[in-house]
Image: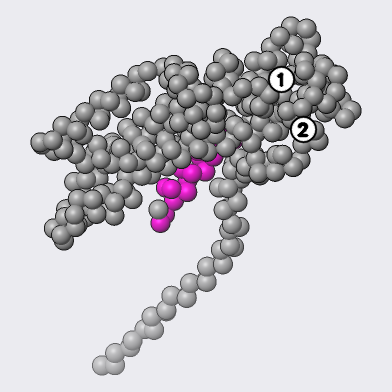
């Protein structure tokens, strides 16, 4: 009996998948919101070089309307509002940078120490809990009162104002860092570092701090924006930098009387500059958050 084997048809080879077109790089979209802040930073560097007039000198008749050689007009003393608004960018932003660096550095250090020692016994734990209560007490005091007291003690200068604002805004960074340290300090890699013979300071600096700093770093741009608002508020209340130093809060305060007489420009332009600076810091927050939470960070 002859056995006939039927040929089994083979399945056709699958057609090659069409090549997926390469997606255009979207990296620029991440950085785009940082553009206003970058432009302000550039203006901070070159502010005194681009102003047409000395921002602290009377250059024209008082209360000239915007136009001509005086783009933003002049104030009640005859100083150029455009030059003063641009020069104030340097003053306010440099102060905000100093405040942000000091508040974040102190906040990271205190938050790290508090988080690692909060549950410890003996003197170390007592000091840790005492520092925690002191931080809460500092945060309970209204910011403007702290600013007024510090300026009253040390005088109105960029350094004294920066120290005052750093003390005001530092507790926020302490709490964020402490909360993250409390989550990280019991992780396996921290225990492994201890068993490897590292000292407590080495464990904190090498392993706990790098994994606990992200919330404070993300919040640093908020600190930057709030410091601009508080410094302008102190200037508006008359306890900031002394005139004729160009500062947005001082300019808004001294221009209020001009508004009642129709001189709206002496207050409007520094107020707009203040809003733009704070908004640019808010946009920068999103950029920092995306970068710190992207793969590899």
Q: Which residue is nearer to you in this view: 124 or 7? A: 124
Q: Which residues are magenta?
A: 279-296
Q: Is residue 156 magenta?
A: no
Residue 27 in the image: state x and y as whole percent.
57, 53
Which of 51 and 209 lies nearest the eye of the viewer? 51
Mark 1 against mark 2, which lies toward the viewer? 2
Quadrant of the rendered image containing residue 89: top right
Q: Is residue 215 visible?
A: no
Point out residue 184 in the picture as x, y percentages from the top left corner: 25, 45
Q: Quadrant of residue 8?
A: bottom left
- On screen, 99 above or below 59? below
Q: Is residue 75 visible?
A: yes
View extreme (front): residue: 154
In what quadrant of the picture does the N terminus appear?
bottom left
Q: Is residue 251 left or right of 229 when viewed as pictured?
A: right
Q: Earlier in the sequence, mark 1 or mark 2?
A: 2
């Amino acid at each position: 009996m002859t056995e006939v084997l039927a040929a089994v048809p083979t399945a056709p080879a699958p057609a090659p998948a069409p090549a997926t077109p390469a997606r255009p790089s979207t990296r620029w979209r991440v950085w785009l919101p940082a553009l206003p802040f970058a432009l302000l930073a550039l203006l901070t560097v070159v502010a005194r070089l681009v102003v047409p007039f000395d921002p602290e000198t009377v250059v024209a008749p008082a209360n000239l309307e915007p136009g001509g050689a005086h783009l933003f007009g002049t104030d009640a003393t005859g100083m150029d509002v455009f030059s003063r608004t641009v020069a104030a960018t340097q003053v306010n932003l440099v102060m905000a940078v100093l405040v942000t660096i000091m508040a974040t550095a102190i906040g990271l250090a205190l938050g790290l120490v508090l988080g690692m020692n909060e549950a410890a016994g003996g003197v170390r734990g007592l000091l840790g809990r005492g520092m925690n209560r002191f931080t809460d007490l500092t945060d309970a005091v209204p910011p403007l009162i702290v600013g007024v007291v510090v300026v009253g003690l040390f005088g109105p200068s960029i350094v004294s104002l920066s120290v005052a604002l750093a003390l005001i805004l530092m507790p926020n960074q302490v709490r964020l860092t402490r909360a993250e340290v409390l989550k990280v300090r019991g992780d396996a890699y921290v225990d492994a570092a201890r068993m490897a013979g590292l000292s407590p300071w080495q464990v904190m600096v090498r392993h706990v701090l790098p994994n606990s700093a992200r919330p404070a770093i993300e919040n640093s741009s908020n600190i930057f924006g709030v410091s601009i608002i508080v410094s302008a508020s102190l200037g508006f209340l008359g306890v900031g930098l002394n005139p004729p130093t160009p500062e947005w809060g001082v300019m808004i305060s001294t221009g209020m009387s001009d508004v009642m007489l129709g001189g709206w420009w002496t207050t409007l332009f520094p107020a707009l500059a203040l809003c733009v600076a704070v908004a640019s810091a808010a946009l920068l927050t999103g950029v920092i958050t995306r970068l710190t939470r992207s793969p590899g960070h």
